[in-house]
Amino acid sequence: MKKILLTILAGIIALCPFAGCGNSSDVKTIELNEVTHSVFYAPLYIAIENGYFEEEKIKVNLTNGGGADKSMTALLSGTADIALMGPETVVYVYNQGKKDAPKVFGQLTKRDGSFLVSRNAEPDFKWEDLRGKEILAGRKGGVPAMTFEYMLNELGLYNGTDVTLNFDVQFNLMTSAFIGGTADYCTVFEPTASEYESAGTWHIVGSVGEQSGEIPYTSFIALDSYISSNQDTVKGFLRALKKAFEFLNTHTEKEVAEAIVKQFPSTTITALEASVKSYKKIDAWQKDMTATEKSFERLQKIMINAGELKESVPFDKLVNNTFVKEIFS
């Protein structure tokens, strides 16, 4: 009898990996594609490094798209479940008439996260100083380029007349192009901006986000079908980010830098601390992650100004705030 019982027990143990006897089968994997890797997305990295996703039984596989167009392609092709990118992409896809359209289900940042850098120290820099200069501003049709152009237009500076906006360099190649001698100024995200300034490569002369004001700059986006079919996972994803925001709001810049340093192995704690401080200073993050209709109206106004959009798309076709309101209430 003992032999029979031991044989049955051994069989049960052998079957456990397939039957989900452990917790591993309960873990949901999310393929997440981010538009670029930047301290601008610190709450995401805090959630990863502090184990907040694991607490929600979520495993995040993070990949870098190197541009919003590429991140949206990953989402539409099914190689990504969720993408972190500019919500202008949602507007473009909606206007293409796609049935299973992508939607914003959580907004991470609420203003431009780039900083204008110059090869020269300009302690008294004014935006008017860009007159007659060439600026590497990002990919045409992307939020960074459109926001920058809109900001300049509000200051009375127009591309081709007062300034030259270079849209020809791919987003992830702008830094190397500027270092190689292209243009007079460049827009750069953190931690690259602070890190290279410390190295003496350039000087930060202005914050684009501080000057341009609030817009829904970077959002978590998924196909409507994914959101509908994975509601518990979406809620868990947002709960993890809520914990990350709580950490961000209750810890020093240095403590935040120490929490995310594994995401930036070649960057010093000092540079990361300076980056976090820069973003806190300009109030970069949307702490309740809610996308507002007013902010999307401004985004589409910016897109129309750039010649990338003819008329606005209704807010409810672009955004699903249901879960973020439930989690952050």
Image (cartoon, grey):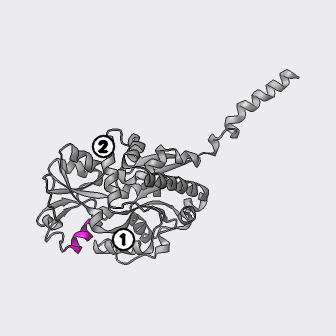
Can see residue 140?
A: no
For the point 60% across and 45% down, the residue is 27
Are the residues flagged by discs 1 and 2 in contact, CB closer than 8 Å?
A: no
Q: Residue furthest right?
A: 1
Q: Is residue 26 left or right of residue 10?
A: left
Magenta residue span:
148-155
Q: Observer-nearest residue: 284 or 19?
A: 284
Q: Amino acid at mark 1?
A: Leu
Taking the magenta stretch, the answer to whether it contains residue 158 is no
Mark 2 nearby-residue class (10 Å; few <14, some 14–19, many ≥20)? some
The residue that disc 1 covers is: 299
SS class of the residue under badge 2? Answer: helix
Q: Where's residue 141, x and y in %?
A: 31, 65
For the point 18% across and 49% down, the residue is 202
Q: Amino acid at mark 2?
A: Thr
Choose top left, top right, bottom left or bottom right for residue 283.
bottom left
Q: Nearer the viewer, mark 1 or mark 2?
A: 2
The residue that disc 2 covers is: 270
Q: Residue furthest bottom?
A: 311
